[in-house]
Amino acid sequence: MEAEIKNENVSNSVLEADGIYFSYDNGYDVFENINIRADSGKFVAIIGPSGIGKSTLLRILGGFLKPDKGIVKLLGKTLYEPTPEVALIHQSIVTFPWMDAQENVMLSMKAKDMSRDEMESKAKEALSRVGLDGFEDLYPKEMSGGMRQRVAIARAFAADPYVFLMDEPFAHLDELTAEGLRQDIYNILFSGETPLKSVIMVSHNLTEVLELADEIYILNNIPATVVGRVEVTMPRPRNPRSDNFNANLDALYSYLTPPRKKK
Amino acid sequence: MVMAAITLITLAVLATVARVIGLIILSIIAGWFLAYASIKSKFFENIYIILIEIFESVPVITFFPIVLVIFITRIGGPLGVELAADFLVLTAVVWNIWMGEYQAFKTVPREMVEVVENSRFGLFSKLRYLYIPFSVPRITANLFPSISDGFFYITVSEVFEVGVHTYQTFGIGSVLDTFVADGQLFNIEMALLIMGIAIVAIIVILREFSKYAVGRYTLDTDAPVMKRGRLNLRETARVFAVLSKNPLTRLARYYKYREGDNHEETYEKKERKQKRYRYVYAAAGIIILVAILYGAVSLITSVKLSEWGILIGKTPSLLTGLGYDYLRVATILVISMAIAIFLGYYLAVNRRAEKYWIPIIQSLSAYPAPIYFPFLFILTEPFIFGIFGVFTNELYVLSLGFISTFYYVFYSFWMGVKAMPAEYWEITRNLKLGYFRKMRKVVIPSTFPYLISGISSTINSAWGGLMIGEYWPDIYGTHSLTVHSGLMKTIDVATATGDIALAAWGSLIFGIIVAVYSVLFTRRMMDLAQKKYVAEEGVYSA
């Protein structure tokens, strides 16, 4: 009997943006009533034409920018500022050249009450998770682009986030490296070995989006609104060379019309 | 006896080196906090940057009357003299270091800032892990001119005369002055040698550090570098919005965060906190303004009312003197540029020559010209007088100005040529451009921002050379070096005869005109350079 009782207020949402409006200081309206929700265990992608404000939206979701109106909620509580629980991974590969790989990863734990030994051990674990076992002492200048992006991802992992915000994380990598990293990332993300509950990714690469995402939000118009939401139900692993994949890809392309200014 | 002299000289050199290096370190540390305050508060930034720009373009002599009034008259004694010397050296080294740190802090890529914001770093962690390491290459680049400037002024900083009083503090400048006065030739030669060894050692260490700094601290990421100056800040201003917390607050936050009841703060609470910090930075800006006003009021009240009429009456002749000085500066600049463009280009494209000549030029520029110039004068004066007659002194003053300032435009241009994109060189080869066409169409336009920066530094430093050269009593024996007319000479003579009011008035007129010139000419040229001649964002990270 008790098992049938269902609390309607219980939400599966990890990160949620409700009614987001945002303008730049020069008065340019970027967003109008954006609603996005990332549920537990879901990989969410945001797509849209260039310049629509995808990266800006990601920064609002991370608490880096304050919306003019609307709220962002993390696990049901309003997010007012950046927090290690929501880790942002950038399009441009951000590693600190004056720190080796391990120190780069340890950076995300410096503000926490952890001993150096704990930090080192956790950094090694994070590096190992992204396939950089044995490369702890290398400096970014001694690494390839793919390795450096792995370091940035390991740094984000080490902060034990609930949500990853990924801003075109594979854009600066060659296709082979990106493909390998995409597979690794997806496997790691929901392996259950980390507190990570959800991922929101912005990307121009629709193949990448279709390969990874469970849900896709499509932004368009000026100011931008969510013009569509697509659930990707294709079974995993997804093969980008299959007919079904390509049919879905074609459908997705049709959403990406040039932005139109609202009257 | 000889050993005692060598020991004395060595100690004096060490004292001078410690004074210059110590003040540079002090400038660097203070500059980090000031730069951080200026990226956090627009109000503070506006005060800070305008003041740096003005003071950077006004040579050390402008501070001389302030030094005399505040340190010598008010504080007095050996401490007052030491502080006066320190202050004069500080004014020679500090501005470009502070400007470099400010520019570095302003150009930290937004993505890197977001990483430390994401980790909720406090002020000291942000400085330690991000801002300070990021500023190291630019500080290193500024160390060469700062050290050169610091040493250049030691002769006027460590020993100076006001009326019948001579004030001096221990260092190679004051020791050398004693040797020259007593005609101790051997000791003078030893002093020059030991000073030379110290300077070469410093340059070698700096060059090694520079290589290390470039290798370790320069960016190799894809994170875009923003432009210099107060530009393109809309985005970063938002990102910078979250202010740092003190350690106790951070600790308290941490436990709050662990308990799972974070995110309780509202935007309003956050904004109130930010406002509090903004007030702190604004207060710091106001304190700086008050300190400057205090200096100005101290100067004004030190002049009797009856003297003001005399000062106003002398203003036309002061302005005429300034006109002569601008002609001298222009001559020095034209000669410096002509040599810099040909030599700088030659060394930038000839690696073998560059390998030997750049360290030599760097060492020569750091070796204070006022120390060895009297000996050049002794050796060449009879010969030069035979050729130039009454223009001999003018020629020496221009020469002193040239050797004290040539380096800046040369070094800037050389760096500019080195930073030219490889594609430009390929195009010049592809089009088979001749030497002069290549210079006119490609090399000079693409190095224009560097040239303007070098020209600006050269002009500023030329005033220092004129200040020392236009009135140099007893440069050796009974010989004096002095020009017929010049504002620098008037200020020098007024200071030496104890007429502080005239010295201060001349300095004030000079300061105002230099500042106006800086706003009307240098800044416009820099803006033009940024708008029209910057090839790519990467130039700014050079």
Image: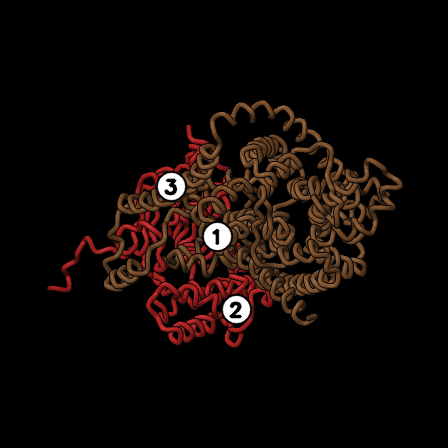
Cβ atoms under marks 3 and 2 closer than 8 Å: no
Q: Residue at x 48, y 48 (%)?
A: A252
What secondary structure is found at the residue carrying circle 3? helix
Q: Give the residue type that dot 1 points to.
A: Gly
Q: Which mark is residue B282?
A: 3
Q: Give the residue type that dot 2 points to.
A: Asp
Q: Residue furthest left?
A: A1
Question: Mark 3 or mark 1, which is nearer to you?
Answer: 1
Position of residue B104 relative to residue B317, above or below, is: below
Towards the viewer: B83 or B510: B83
Residue A75 in which image quadrant:
bottom left
Indicate the chain coloured brown by its letter: B
Q: Tag 2, which chain?
A: A
User: Disc 3 versus disc 1: distance between alpha carbons?
Assistant: 35 Å
User: Disc 2 versus disc 1: distance between alpha carbons?
Assistant: 52 Å
| Residue placed under numbered mark 2 in the picture | A100
Question: Mark 3 or mark 2, which is nearer to you?
Answer: 3
A165 relative to B147 in the view: left or right: left
Residue B433 in which image quadrant:
top right
Residue B465 image point, x, y percent: 68, 44
Residues at discs 3 and 1 both on one chain? yes
Cβ atoms under marks 2 and 1 closer than 8 Å: no
Q: Which mark is residue A158?
A: none
Rendering colour (chain A)? red
Q: Residues within 10 Å of mark 2 (few under 14, many from 20)?
A: many
First in sequence: mark 3 or mark 1? 1
| Residue placed under numbered mark 1 in the picture | B77
Residue A35 image point, x, y percent: 34, 44
Towards the viewer: B76 or A203: B76
